[in-house]
Image: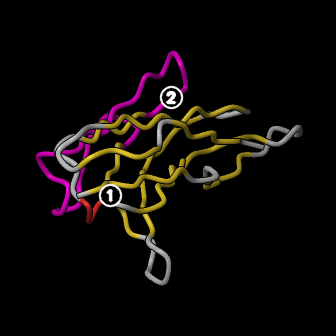
């Protein structure tokens, strides 16, 4: 079982910065992608940023130029550096990991794991 633990959320003023971390633990054979999503109550969860196994990054238009996703494979950690934060960025942020693990019998399993979420509030 792969578990993800997020940290780094909190309250910040408009224009400020935060860095989220997402640490993975468990048996991971291959990472296909790490993603950050966000969700505001009453709205759909939306993709913020993605980094594939080979390091290719993509961003939602509403964060391009402000947010940066990165990964430290040695620490099993993915980061989301958020700069120039706006009140509209206020949401619960979730990390996700798409990858392959193996059962005790050696059978590959494709999985997606989610973190528990961390809240970010940007004050105006």
Q: From the image, tell me which residue sits under label 1.
A: 48
Q: From the image, tell me which residue sits under label 2.
A: 77
Q: Earlier in the sequence, mark 1 or mark 2?
A: 1
Q: Going by the image, does 92 lie left or right of 51?
A: right
User: Which residues make up the magenta segment?
Assistant: 52-78
Q: Going by the image, does 87 lie left or right of 24?
A: left
Q: Considering only vertical position in the picture, is 11 above or below 53?
A: below
| Label 2: element kind | strand
Where is residue 26 drawn, in percent x and y? 73, 33
Toward the left, the furthest residue is 65
- Of residue 122 and residue 109, the one placed in the foreground of this image is 122
| Label 1 CA crowd tier, 10 Å (few <14, some 14–19, many 20+) | many
Residue 3 disc label: none
| Label 1: element kind | strand
Where is residue 68 drawn, in percent x and y? 25, 39
Q: Considering only vertical position in the picture, is 91 above or below 98?
A: below
- Asked if the magenta segment contains residue 66, the reply would be yes
Q: Indicate the quadrant containing the N terminus: top left, top right, bottom left or bottom right.
A: top right
Tell me the residue at 42%/52% (across/down): 120
- Of residue 109 and residue 21, the one placed in the foreground of this image is 21
- Of residue 57 and residue 82, the one placed in the foreground of this image is 82
Where is residue 114 drawn, in percent x and y? 61, 54
Tell me the residue at 27%/46% (across/down): 13
Tell me the residue at 55%/26% (across/down): 76
């Amino acid at each position: 079982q792969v578990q993800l633990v997020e940290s780094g959320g909190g309250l910040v003023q408009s224009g400020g910065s935060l860095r989220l971390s997402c640490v993975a633990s468990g048996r991971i054979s291959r990472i296909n992608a790490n993603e950050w999503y966000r969700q505001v109550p009453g709205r759909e969860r939306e993709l913020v940023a993605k980094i594939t196994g080979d390091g290719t990054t993509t961003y939602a238009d509403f964060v391009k130029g402000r947010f940066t996703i990165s990964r430290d494979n040695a620490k099993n950690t993915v980061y989301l550096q958020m700069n120039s934060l706006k009140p509209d960025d206020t949401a619960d942020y979730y990390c996700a990991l798409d990858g392959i693990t193996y059962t005790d019998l050696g059978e590959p399993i494709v999985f997606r794991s989610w973190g528990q979420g961390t809240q970010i509030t940007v004050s105006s």
